[in-house]
Amino acid sequence: MKAIDLFAGAGGFSLAAHQCGIDVVAAIELDSAAAATYQQNLISRLSAPTTLINDDINVVDIAELMGKLNLNEGELDIILGGPPCQGFSTHRINNTGVDDPRNQLLLRYFDFIHAFKPKAFLVENVTGLLWQRHAAYLDKFLKLAKKAGYNIQFCGAINAKEYGVPQNRKRVFILGTRKDIKDAALIFPPAATHFAPKKGNPTWRAASTVFEKPTNSILKEYVQLYQQTMPKQEAELHVANLEFGSQLPKNDKCNIHMVHTDNVAQRFRETPLNGSRSDIEFRLKCHSNDYKGHKDVYGRIILDQPSNTITTGCNNPSKGRFVHPWLDHGITLRHAARLQTFPDDFEFLGNSSEQAKQIGNAVPVELGRKLISEIKTIITP
């Protein structure tokens, strides 16, 4: 089975497809650092048969690419991809982002659907895509797909934490299948595998799963913390049942964190377990006049819950709740990658900001694998 990955980034979607036994025969990515990461991990290490194009997708000649791949119309199994989402971001206020030129990349994605006529396509984007202010782009994309002979099987939000990803990450997915493909067996999105804590159900995976087990003294501090809301015996059991990850290899090049000033490090020392800047005397200049917003910035990862969404600023505590659960610094790039369910042997290239961008932009590998596995049930020859 063959796929192409548009706006491929570091290769989260491609790695998921690879794990499903699908050959990604072409990947297009503009960012050179992300393309280098893709080359090293997917092509060099895993021997993926991928033609990697490090260029602007707008200048790629689709007909020429089809010839190079020796693919005729209708022969490709699936197109994957997450067009850059900054224009659709929910962080934009009022009508900013409506005329962002990057919004047009969703329609460029359709050009590849129109030319290749794959059996299926899967788009990933931020939830802001569903906002009314962006309806013109989404409606046009859906109408073009339907006119081209596709059934839109799903267009809505999916939360990664419901599929075994230790992260509260809600994203929009659009699945289209060619009308000649029998879809009676398709269940999309697949049934959730992880749920809110309740006896008898597999619960959401907690952020603790990506961190090494702390010392007994730290664990006792967590027991004392949870005793504030539950009896001591229950708190002890709660902490004892937390799942922790393996030790990070000392030679892991992604096992690095931001170096903080003494003042910032002191603020982290004062921040309690599971706490945030609102728990200490720490007020940002932009939060004057009793402004209460952005409470998560400079906050610690909450150990017993799925983490907050891993973003392109995941290496910088000023961008979100990205402080280590008990140590006095930001999380490492490897911790962020684990929260995105990348394996530890997946090495991100570039400087730390470039690596953080690649990690934050990626589709969580485990989520991608489960979604693609379901789609595979109907496009398998």
Image (tube, rainbow, N blue to C red):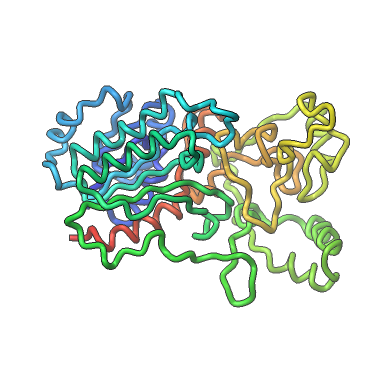
Determine whether 253 is above or below 284 in the image. below
Q: Position of residue 335 (x, y in %)?
A: 59, 45
Determine whether 54 is above or below 280 in the image. above
* Point 19% across, 44% down: residue: 117
- Given residues 247 and 241, the one toward you in this image is 241
- Given residues 9 and 260, the one toward you in this image is 9
Q: Position of residue 358 (x, y in %)?
A: 48, 35
Give the quarter of the figure containing the C terminus: bottom left
Determine whether 124 is above or below 222 in the image. above
* Point 33% across, 55% down: residue: 153
Q: In the shown orientation, is residue 274 left or right of residue 2?
A: right
Q: Position of residue 374 (x, y in %)?
A: 34, 61
**Number of dots carrying numbers:** 0
> Residue 93 falls in which quadrant of the image?
top right
Q: Position of residue 269 (x, y in %)?
A: 83, 40
Q: In the shown orientation, is residue 25 left or right of residue 154?
A: left
> Residue 96 falls in which quadrant of the image?
top right
